Image (cartoon, rainbow, N blue to C red):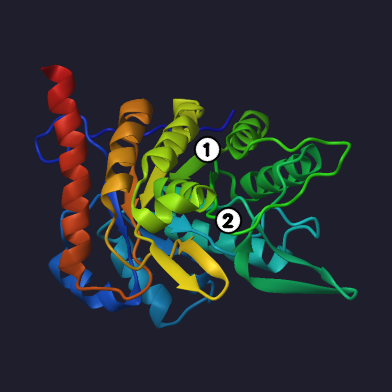
Amino acid sequence: MLRFEPDVTNLGGVGPATHLGIGWRHPHYAALLERRPALNFLEVHSENFFASGGAALAVLEQGRSHYPISLHGVALSLGSAAGLDPWHLDRLAELVERIDPVRVSDHACFARGVHKGKLVHASDLLPIPFTHEALDVMCQHVDQVQERLKRPFMVENLSAYLAWKAPAAEAAWQEVEFLMALTRRTGCSLLVDVNNIYVNALNAYPSSAVDGRTEDAELACRAWLDAIDPPCVGEMHLAGHCRVSDAYGDIVIDDHGSQVCEAVWRLYGHAVQRFGPVPTLIEWDTDIPALDVLLGEVDRARAVVATLRTEALA
């Protein structure tokens, strides 16, 4: 069975520590190549590098000469009943062959379907129903991707802003049950986005998002993390979120536009205790700050792991 094995190489003299990386976005291309900060990997969005040449791919190859690269997709649409896009999968396979990434991933979602007899692609990551039929579709597509790429694949849990009602004849699973079944059937690994779990929990407990009392949301997140089999986790993501209030109500959005909040740092500590020091990424995709701000978040993640290790050895 295909599996990712977490790399626990020493980092900063702390002892076994997580591999730490950042999402490498255009505003930081030049600064990162010039400074080459102490990072263990860079992660990019696969679709931004599907061209067979050009400036973007040249920059990625420069980055690859200094850092391992993790390819993270946002448009493979693993949960689509319309099937995978052959062009997309071909481009991804070519990029994987060219870059030789340390990890390849996408989301447990769908983005393409049939509308009025035509295939259409949405501009968002849409949630799937957690049913046996949806699981069959996901497993088929994950198997297809792994066979095409000739390597194991990671699937990320989604921040979802709607949910499907299961057919009366089939009770829906919980998300974590669905994901665990996916790993058992395909041998894929999970990319656990801690912020996504927290965003979903805040939206499930609206008072948490409004008045700052996050106990119920954090307890729900801990239960989610505790239900995951540790060997299945190949990477973790950390990011910021925002709260939006308008005439339609209040909602928390996973916008990747701010620093990781204190509750997510606490949950990350819990996740490290449960899963071990698996590779961890700092994501920042909107209102992108100076590179030093992201590196400060990396230092915070390093400190979380170091503190846990010290406590474990005490």
Quadrant of residue 120 within the rendered picture: bottom right
In front of the other: 102 or 242: 242
Query: Dividing the picture into quarters, in which one does residue 310 lie?
Result: top left
- Measure the C-alpha gap from mark 1 to mark 2: 20 Å
The mark lying in front, picked from 1 and 2, is: 2
Identify the residue at horizontal 45%, vertical 48% (top origin): 103
- Image quarter where the C terminus lies is top left
Residue occupied by mark 1:
189
Residue that numbered label 2 is attached to:
160
Residue 86 makes an appearance in the image: yes
Residue 199 can be seen, yes or no: no
Image quadrant holding the N terminus, namely: top right
The amino acid pointed to by label 1 is Ser
Image position, residue 214 (x, y; %): 37, 45
Q: Which mark is residue 212?
A: none
Residue found at the far bottom of this picture? 54
Q: Residues within 10 Å of mark 2 (few under 14, many from 20)?
A: some
